[in-house]
Image (spheres, helix red, strand yellow):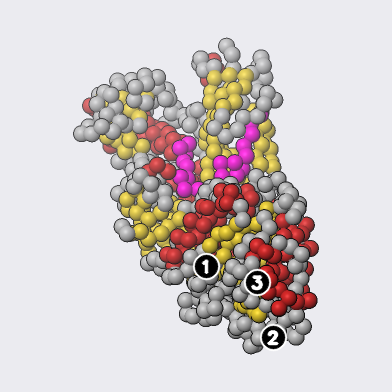
Amino acid sequence: MAGRLYALLVGIDAYPPPIPALSGCVNDVTGFAEVLRERVGADALDLVVLADGEATRSAVTTHLSDHLGRATAQDVAVFYFSGHGSQQATPEELWSIEPDRRNETLVCVDSRSPNSWDLADKELAGLLHGISASGCHTLVVLDCCHSGDGTRNADEVVRLSPPDPRSRPAATFVALDGPTAAVRGTGRWTPAGHHVLLAACRSSEKAKEVTAGGRRHGALSAALDAALLGFDGRPTYRDVLRLVTADVTGRVTDQHPQLETTDATELDRPFLGGAIQATPRPLTLSRLPDGWSIDSGAVHGVPEPRGDDTTELAVYPLTGETSGSPLATASVTKVLPDRSLVRLTPELDESFIYRAVVTSIPLDPLLVGVVGDAVGTAALRRAADHADETLVDLVDVGRDGTVSGGTTVADLLVEATSEGFVITRPGVTRPLVPVVEGEGREERTVLALERVARWLRLSALTNATTALGADAVRVEVDAGTGAVGAGGTLTIAYAGSDAPRFTVRLTNTTAAPLWAALLDLTETYGIFTDAFPAGSVALGPGESTSVDLVGQVSDALWEAGTASLRDQLMVVTSTLEFDPRTLEQEELDVSEVPAAGTTRGADMAPSPRSNLERALGGTRTRRLGRSPESAGVADWRTDSVFVVTVRPR
């Protein structure tokens, strides 16, 4: 959509007697307003909400004409009404356009007051014709009843106001110069002019209410909010009708939402004319015949449980915030191709769909195959008894690196020789680090393996279930020859003895505040987190920050024959503030001689403040214990750019 979205949302619960009061209507429009802010964006939205006493007949008709009337051919106009529907006798002067002599009406808060009236179908048709005449795309959503026996909720609270018994003069009708013939004799609301209508139910059915997220809503409104928040990308009107119908019919009986238009091609148009931003869908949890499951599985990157270590999730209302205490927690018990079965604590209402946020991801220890001299391998295993078993697991392998008794290939190989220990990757003869020799070599080898394990686990850390888009924080790395984005490689070179410089620019492309950290994972297994003084930096909507860096190949490495090095620049993006500085580790040096018996894992990090800090800490050790109940739940993702620094001989 090139233009703006103009929305008029009307919700009325507090009708004055004798009109019965309702519940959930104000929730409907305030909830839809939040959906528009989230999925359309505040910058493209002109929104008016009229609730209860504000929703007079005069205010509704004036805002229809003046507010929605501002929409041009590039814009979208939306009228959303949640309240009483009713009927009234048609004046004799209008019988020619209403053979059944009954008007379908919307009941404003003052409609039954002296000198005020309901908003009749013919009036609304004329007003909408004036709006759509500019060429704008127009949508009408009516979560109310238009049949003689309709009610709004499952408890049979009447959502249909009694007919107005007063005789209404034809002169009190407004906007009758539009195509009123489009509504002639239909007995229900039918589009006039060029617009789309989404109605809560058929004319013979009841529009019911449900409880969603602990609040009362119309079944249509709750389903529409869930559909727009949960859809990946830009849904068409057919998509929305399919999702809304499935949701409504799954919650209540005898209610079928209706989508109507005078132009059938509108049904294949993007909902709201394309005003909805294309964003990844959130991870959802629902009850299926084989149990509770999340809608992500092996094809989405959800890892299999590692014994008792498995993917853990916090569960929230589908349309609610995910920063407070969750409704429940879940742990993955089985990963299927397209979804994963979970164990839920405590049980929740099976008739609803929920949002799930990953709080912990299982990480395997590094499998290290040990080969070579028997005396050396035995000494190395004794030293590994004091290591962090969540990081390193020494296993027996063949010369090809295959673990004994299976087909799994070890991540690393350590060969014990008379000179010391040689660490390589299976199938690669070049050592990862210099041969570990001399005093304390067993302990130093285990320390080196732990450090490599932390580096490898961090470098591969991803969140398979993130709802943050790939460009939520746009990454641009530039050395003056053109920017490289996430997933790309930038090659830079020394000019004589001068090290090359480059800039990393991060931009928040979303409408919400985000936090970002820039981690440098060097080829020599160093992890540096000092790009920002606090570890991460806050970025408001549209805000950018830049970091100037220098690519280096040290003199020692260059003189030893290394002409190029590759750094992995990992950008970690989060919806909550976080501190990655506990990940810091110096580049690998196997010359240091530790005291005998001092082989150890990483120091325990401070108690994680969020699920992201727990995930980051899990790359260093799985000995984290339980997260505190006060820990926040963030959505997060990782993206990397690779920088190759060349220092010619």
Q: Earlier in the sequence, mark 3 or mark 2?
A: 3
Residue at which label 2 appears: 166
Look at 39% across and 66% down and name the residue there.
350
Kindly state the secondary structure of the residue where label 2 is placed: loop
| x and y percentages locating residue 247 in the rendered image | 46, 62
Q: Amino acid at mark 3?
A: Glu
Q: Nearer the viewer, residue 553 or 301?
A: 301
Q: Residue furthest left?
A: 405
Mark seen at residue 201: 1
440 to the left or right of 7 = left
Kindly state the secondary structure of the residue where label 3 is placed: loop
Can you say whether 46 is above or below 602 in the image?
below
Look at 41% across and 54% down and name the residue there.
294
Check contact, mark 1 vs mark 2: CB within 8 A: no
Measure the alpha-carbon separation of dots 3 and 2.
18 Å
**Which of the 4 image quadrants contains residue 303?**
top left
Q: Amino acid at mark 1?
A: Cys
Look at 23% across and 34% down and name the residue there.
406
Measure the alpha-carbon separation of dots 1 and 3.
22 Å
Kindly state the secondary structure of the residue where label 1 is placed: loop
**Is there any visible trace of residue 633 in the rendered image?**
no
Can you say whether 56 is above or below 302 in the image?
below
| x and y percentages locating residue 282 in the rendered image | 50, 52
Estimate how packed mark 3 is, as few (under 14), some (14 to 19) or many (20 or more) residues with alpha carbons within 10 Å.
many
> Which stretch appears magenta?
458-479
Residue at which label 3 appears: 98
